[in-house]
Structure formats: structure tokens, C-alpha cells
Image (spheres, rainbow, N blue to C red):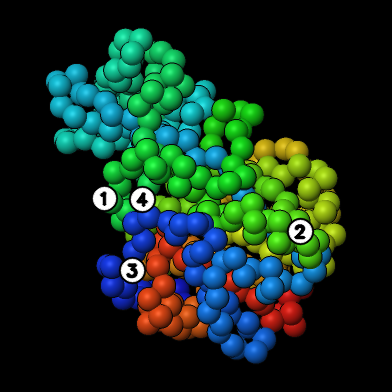
Amino acid sequence: MEEDQLLKSYFYDLPPELIAQRPADPRDSSRLLVFDEASGTVEHAHFRDLPKFLPPKATLVLNNSRVFPCRLPAKKTTGGKAEIFFLSLKDEGSGHPCLIKTTGKKRVGDQFILTGSHGDISATIKKVNDEGVFTISIDGELSDLIEEQGKVPIPPYIRSGESDAQDLLDYQTLYAREDLEGTGSVAAPTAGLHFTEKVFSDLAVKEILPHHVTLHVGLGTFRPVKVANIMDHKMHEENFYVEESVWQNIINSNYRVAVGTTSLRVLESLWPTKDLYQGGEMRGTDIFLHPGIKVQSINALMTNFHLPESTLLMLVSALIGREKTLELYEIAVKERYRFFSYGDAMLILRDQRRVV
């Protein structure tokens, strides 16, 4: 088996104190590690310096999906505590997909009680799939409960996953928008958290404009890899769409910058048939980018520093190779960069000889 296919090959040591617990303030004061693949050079800057590293008229591709407060407290009918983590607010016909945290085994037919200001709502398990995802039916109005009691789904490495009022603002991009179908993301597209109006204004001076795609972040992005050979890993499908005019601007651009791994996954999902896609329709993708997969759609990637052995780290490795990726992470650790969702950022400027 090739080393690039081994899960353990994507492990690196990270001192716990480098895991960011709050974002930089202001957002654009976060640090930025810039890697120029053609020259092999590394430069240390701040996110507010982003415009100077990009050519005029470059196209920024950003994921504008909005995070919804998807974690709801619940009780078992026996009185025991539980938490329901909704993966979508949309009823998919048989019910809502979710994760359930509670003691004891969970079976089809089990009921949970959600308590709101308008009374109790019952949630019943209808189905369990092999990935530990449950489908539940709700006998009341879910949106009111989400608005009243929903917690922001910050990851467990940030304050043990216990969000507060500040996270309602911090764990959302400046440009996130409500989805017309009433769904959204269960994790933020974190590369976008660094942007401020000032950065967008400075980019506009160079005619670098944002182009928004929408991918609703779900299990596909944050589910851990549990197999020794990454080729055996199956990504969970996530939904995305791009408006027709936006898509045409993206494919006609001479220099494309994906802001975040989710934006890149949208582009790579569509790129093989880019001239046939008309835009405006919801699609699903389970694309898994890793070394051995040729990334064709972008000239540069803006991304945060990701967890060891994660599919996101493998995605970055697909661009510049696993060894170079881990080398850059080692530099970031040495230079005391802040890691993960609320951490600092990295800009990869690809060697244009490798871009199709």
C-alpha cells in the first residue's frame, strides 16, 4: 500500500495550546501563511494583507451557506438527558437526519421530548443507517424550537463544544445568507471567517470580486476517517448549488481562488462537465479529494489549518502533496500559528505550470 493511502501518514503533533478557542479580533488580524509553490517560498503575513498576494481581476469563490444553531437539548421518555444534532432542518420525506447523544442504545421507535415555550414536541426515531445517522419524525414546529433553544455547533475542540452568545456572531461568515429551502450548514466554512468589509474593499481596488457558491456543510466535511486505508473512506453526500451567472463568471476567469475546502469541492464536482452545467439547480456531491486526484479548477486555495488525519488535510495534500503539506504544518507549529476553526489561515499559490 502506498504511504499516501495510509491514514496514519496524515498525522502530525500539535500542542493543545495552539488550538484557537476564539477568533482573532478583528477578524482580518489573523495570521496568514503564504506558500508559493513555483518558488517554494513561505511568507508570514496577516489576513488583511491578502490583496497584495493575488493578481488583479482574480476571482474569489466563497461558500455563503449559513450555519444554523442545530444542537437541541432533549429528554428521553425515562427522563434521561439527550441532545439532538440536526443535520438538516428540511424534512427529507421520512423525517429529519440527525445525530443523537445520550446514554444507552438507541433503537427505531425510541422517543425523545423537546421542550419549548409553546409546549413539548415529540421526536421519534424512524430509521438508523450504518454511519450512525438517525432519521427522526417531529410532531410539531421545529423552526420555533431552533430559534429558542438551538446552540451553535462549534466543534468539540473549542471549549468542549459548549457555545455561547458570542459564537452566534463569531461562527458565521460576514456574507452568509439564509437558504431559500430552509436548510443550512452544521459547521462553518471557516476559511471565510477571516474576511471583513475592509478586506473586500481592498480587494475590489484590484478588481478582485467575490463569487458565491453554496454548499451546505454536513457529515461529508467533518466526519472522521475511521479506516486504515483512506481509499476505503466514503464521503457523506452534501448538497450544493451555483447561480448561472456566477458559474459563467467563474469558468471564464483567468485566475480562480477557492476560499475554503467546501468551495473547492463544489468547483471540482462540476469541473469535468463545467461547460454543460447551467447553474441554479441543487446537486449532491460526495467528492473526496486526496493525493492521486488531480485538482483542475483553481489557481490558489485559501484555507485554515486542519485536524490530523482529516479529509480536509488530505484535500490540501491533493494540491501540493502530503509531504509538503505536513512540512508547512510543521512550520506553522514552530511559528505558533493558531489552528482549526477559529485559527489562522494559509494561502497556497499554485505553480501555474501544474494548473489545467
Disc 4 secondary structure class: loop
Circle 3: residue type: Leu
**Amino acid on which the number 4 mark rests in the picture:** Pro
Residue 142 is situated, as x and y percent measured from the top left of the image, at 43, 20
- Residue hosting label 2: 204
Residue at mark 2 to residue at mark 1: CA–CA distance: 39 Å
Q: In which quarter of the image is the C terminus?
A: bottom right
Q: Which of marks 3 and 2 is nearer the N terminus?
A: 3
Front residue of this view, candidates 14 and 236: 14
Helix, strand or loop at mark 3: helix
> Which mark is on residue 18?
3
Q: Is residue 297 visible?
A: no
In the image, residue 34 above or below residue 165? below
Determine the CA span between mark 2 and mark 4: 33 Å
Residue 91, above or below 259: above
- Mark 4–mark 3 contact, CB under 8 Å? no
Separation of residues labelled 4 and 1 (CA atoms): 7 Å
Q: Do the residues labelled 1 and 3 touch (CB within 8 Å)?
A: no
